[in-house]
Amino acid sequence: MKVENEEFVVQTDVAGQPFVNAHPIECEAPNEQEKPEPFASNVKYLVVGIFFGIVFVKAEIVSWFRIQEMFRLDSFHMYGVIGTAVCVGALSVFLIKKLSIKTLQGEKVQFHPKTFSKGQIYGGLIFGLGWAVTGACPGPLFAQIGAGFGVITVTLLSAIAGTWVYGLLRDKLPH
């Protein structure tokens, strides 16, 4: 159980005894949007998500066989997709910064510096291992389920369980 206030998170351990984390509540990538959007505006995200799901299926990005080809170094297909995404993302960030592009609500987009930690190496290895074993990473999971690969629901539930376990162990892990 968590009880949050402005400065501390109060959690209970397995025995129900409260303990207080000594650090303030922080998010590494806070949403600094000031103007709230009405709930109906979420439809645009649903439409874009459905569009990307269709593109993922048609481009075989959600194909278990394509992902296995990538990890066996048998095909360039997925490396081309990932490389293109990295280039488009880098170009987008560059243009947002250079042209001071604002959000749809007219707010400034802010980028914050990130710090490196060895925990990112461990997390990346675990992520890559899970991706190689299941043939799915978090983005295409929903497209795979939507395409009729019901067994991927096990992967989705495992990802949710892993996130929950990380939340339990976060203070004990290297950051």
Image (cartoon, grey):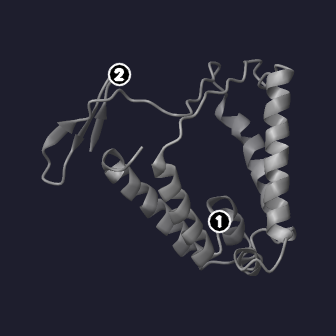
Expressed as whole percent of the image width and height from the top left, the position of residue 149 reads 67, 78
Q: Secondary structure at mark 1?
A: helix
Crowdedness near tag 2: few (<14), some (14–19) or many (≥20) residues, C-alpha within 10 Å: few
Expressed as whole percent of the image width and height from the top left, the position of residue 64 reads 71, 78
Res. 152 in view: yes
Left or right of 17, for residue 79: right
Mark 2: amino acid: Glu
Going 73% across and 18% down the picture, which residue do you hit?
108
Quadrant for residue 41, please give it: top right
Going 48% across and 60% down the picture, which residue do you hit?
160
Q: Quadrant of the C terminus?
A: top left
Mark 1 and mark 2 lie on one chain; the one further toward the N terminus is 2
Q: CA distance from mark 1 to mark 2?
A: 35 Å
The residue under label 2 is 6
Quadrant for residue 127, please give it: bottom right
Of 89 and 49, nearer the camera is 89
The residue under label 1 is 141
